[in-house]
Image: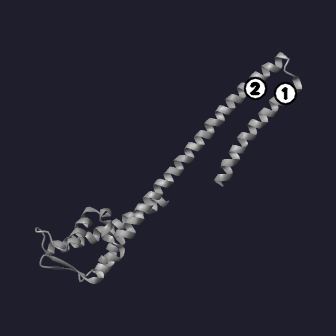
């Protein structure tokens, strides 16, 4: 539909100018150039053609500027949707799967100062290469993942502190997934 409008409009403008040129040629042949009236009419017609051409060029330029703006806006939205999809698919969905499968904390355990991940939890991360997308995480989730990656609790943290961070990270991941999905829906709408 846009193609028809675009080329239909351009065809109309070109047809208009061809019509004016044919009128000039017809008037010139019919009346002759020797009459002062014909020269006066020709001058007036030329001025009119220049004015119409200028107005047409302004309209076409505005239309192209608006079309370019829409294209760039759509590309920006596509990039944002791609970034959201990357965050969801590569980081937040695997994290959500980890938290769902280890709700009783049986897959993530603290033994002394060490963090133990059961093989199923490791598989969730390794299958999606979730650690590679750590930069996409929020600060709280990033802190949690860094502790998991290192496998040791920080000096200032005990098992209760880790499980509190675990619960906060679980809530944060759920909230961020919801926010990202809402943002994606807004961009698509």
Kind of element beneath mark 2: helix
Residue 63's disc is none
Residue 117 x, y percent position in the rendering: 23, 80
- The image quadrant that residue 98 belongs to is bottom left
How are the colours assigned in the image? Answer: one colour
**Residue 181 appears in the figure:** no
* Mark 2: few/some/many CA within 10 Å (<14, 14-19, 20+): some
In the image shown, does 158 or 183 lie closer to the viewer?
158
Kind of element beneath mark 1: helix
Q: Is residue 133 left or right of residue 5?
A: left
In the image shown, does 149 or 40 lie closer to the viewer?
149
**Residue 80 appears in the figure:** yes
List the single residue furthest toward the right.
30
Residue 56 x, y percent position in the rendering: 66, 36
- Residue that appears at 59% across and 39% down: 61
Q: Which residue is mark 1?
A: 27
Residue 45's disc is 2
Residue 64 x, y percent position in the rendering: 58, 44
Q: Is residue 75 left or right of residue 101?
A: right
**Vertical position of residue 105 compared to residue 154: above or below:** below
Residue 67 x, y percent position in the rendering: 57, 47
The reply to whether callout 2 and callout 1 are in contact (CB within 8 Å) is yes
- Residue that appears at 36% across and 74% down: 128
- Residue that appears at 55% across and 45% down: 66
**Vertical position of residue 62 compared to residue 42: above or below:** below
Q: Is residue 102 left or right of residue 84?
A: left
Mark found first going from the N terminus, 2 or 1: 1
- The image quadrant that residue 31 belongs to is top right
């Amino acid at each position: 539909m846009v193609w028809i409008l675009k080329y239909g409009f351009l065809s109309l403008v070109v047809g208009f100018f061809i019509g004016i040129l044919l009128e000039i040629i017809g008037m010139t042949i019919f009346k002759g150039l020797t009459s002062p009236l014909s020269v006066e009419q020709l001058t007036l017609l030329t001025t009119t053609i220049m004015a119409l051409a200028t107005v047409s060029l302004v309209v076409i330029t505005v239309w192209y500027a608006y079309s370019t703006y829409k294209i760039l806006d759509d590309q920006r939205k596509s990039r944002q949707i791609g970034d959201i999809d990357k965050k969801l698919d590569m980081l937040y969905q695997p994290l959500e799967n980890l938290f769902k499968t280890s709700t009783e904390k049986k897959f993530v355990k603290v033994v002394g100062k060490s963090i133990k991940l059961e093989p199923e939890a490791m598989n969730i991360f390794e299958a999606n290469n979730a650690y590679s997308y750590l930069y996409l995480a929020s600060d709280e989730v990033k802190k949690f993942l860094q502790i998991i990656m290192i496998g040791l609790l920080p000096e200032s943290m005990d098992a209760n502190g880790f499980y509190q961070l675990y619960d906060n990270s679980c809530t944060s991941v759920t909230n961020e997934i919801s926010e990202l999905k809402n943002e994606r829906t807004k961009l698509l709408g």
